[in-house]
Amino acid sequence: MLGKGKLLHISLKNLPLGQYLLVVPVPFKMQQVESKGICHGLPVYPPEVKDLVALVTGANGISGYHMVKVLAAAPQRWKKIYCLSRRPPPDYFFNDLGDGASRVEHVAVDFLNEPKDIGEKLKEKIRHVDHVFFFSYVQPQQKGGVTGMWSDADALAEINTKLIANFTGGLKDAGLAPKKFMLQTGAKHYGFHMGPATNPSFESDPRVLLENNFYYPQEDHLFKYCKEIGAKWNVVRPSYIIGAVRDNLLNHMVGISVYAAVQAHLGKPLWFPGDFVAWDKEVCQSTAILNGHFEEWCVLTDTAANEAFNIQDGLNFTWGKFWPYLAKWYGIPWEPPELDESKYRTVETRHERTPRGYGKGITRSTFSLQEWSEAPEVVQAWKELSEKHGLLLDPFKDRAQIFGLSDSAIIGGWPLSLSMRKAKKYGFHGTTDSFEAAFETIQGLGKMHVAVEMAATKFEEMV
């Protein structure tokens, strides 16, 4: 404890490049943190944290893949990383892991099979696991639209609860007992997909019981499983996730990039589909690589055991600030929301009550990206772009998933804010710039031939 008027002198000369000290004044505590790429304030781990074995499910998806990237980049901590998914990884998967690819092994497992069958698959390849990172998810056919995403709540709950139940049963049959099990869920925990929710949302907020929510039975199953085997758990709840993968399109930046590229090809401006409420509302983004760093911190931090945490990028974000960035990246003009009130149509949320328990949820728009995608000139423009750039994506095969997800992120008439106070109190201070992360994501999608490469080649601040 420092006396009154005393100063603490800290020498920085011995810190590795890119690392710095964070001094938290009362109570006195000092942490060493570092920057990695677009992520800043990341924890530095002591050297005795080493030689761990991880098991990552849903490794081909946006979250699972970036989790693997985080672990593969830390050879001193993670000596082996098993990736579980039904389909083999895409061709770029191992190439993008660099030297870390030698410690990553794919195991083909279908979690819709019986636990006994899953256990047999695991026993063939895996003898030991320290920590599990669970990202597996099945998306039934969606209706799309601003309020239609995730509306088939019962189907979502049935299939996704089966995934975790079958997998944990398979772990038992294989004799594998992890020390900690991390389950990623999301902001739907608070009901934002149904209407205005508690804002900002705290991890202690009560469950929203307006309709079925597969996150809740998944959590309940996790708690029961960990109690049975003596493991610890974490639940992590991100917002809309930013990140580039090729074969998993549950990513709102995909529909947004298609919209911008086609508008540029047609010589049209970037129109905004929502009203000024949607334009100015604060919504948090959750960059996949930062999520991965946070989820690693969760399983490696003893004091964070048996806790649920929100995770988001940690800075303010509005579509009104993003739209000029997006237009600049594709070299086209942009337009703010429509001023003529007569051109707006209004949609109310599908429940009389909102997730927060009072008030109404109202969305106003002049068009939706899903509707825009049905125009013949849009379809033809994408065909021309695909031939020119060798694109692998057919965004019209499942419009409801691609453009419905983008619409739900952009047009919804209420803010989305996940409080990070709990994570910060427990000692995680990581952050990233959501605008820069969006640029890197679209740039990455371009390299994967999912998006049209942008006119801009590097991220620059708007002035």
Image: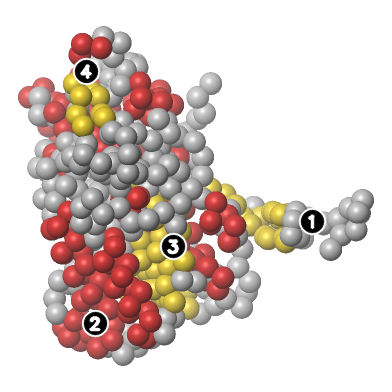
Q: Assess whether mark 1 and mark 4 are in contact (beta carbons under 8 angstroms).
A: no
Q: Which residue is mark 2?
A: 170
In the figure, residue 147 lies in which quadrant?
top left
**N-term-proximal mark, 2 vs 1:** 1
Q: Residues within 10 Å of mark 2 (few under 14, many from 20)?
A: many
Indicate the amino acid at tag 3. Answer: Ala
- Is residue 173 left or right of 199 when viewed as pictured? left
Q: Which residue is mark 1?
A: 13
Nearer the observer, disc 2 or disc 1? 2
Indicate the amino acid at tag 1. Answer: Lys
What is the distance, in whole Å, between disc 1 and disc 3 at their CAs?
A: 37 Å
What is the distance, in whole Å, between disc 2 and disc 1 at their CAs?
A: 50 Å
In the figure, residue 3 lies in which quadrant?
bottom right
Nearer the observer, disc 4 or disc 2? 4
**Identity of the residue drawn at 21% across and 39% down:** 352
Q: Which residue is mark 3?
A: 308
What is the distance, in whole Å, between disc 3 and disc 2 at their CAs?
A: 24 Å
Q: Assess whether mark 3 and mark 4 are in contact (beta carbons under 8 angstroms).
A: no
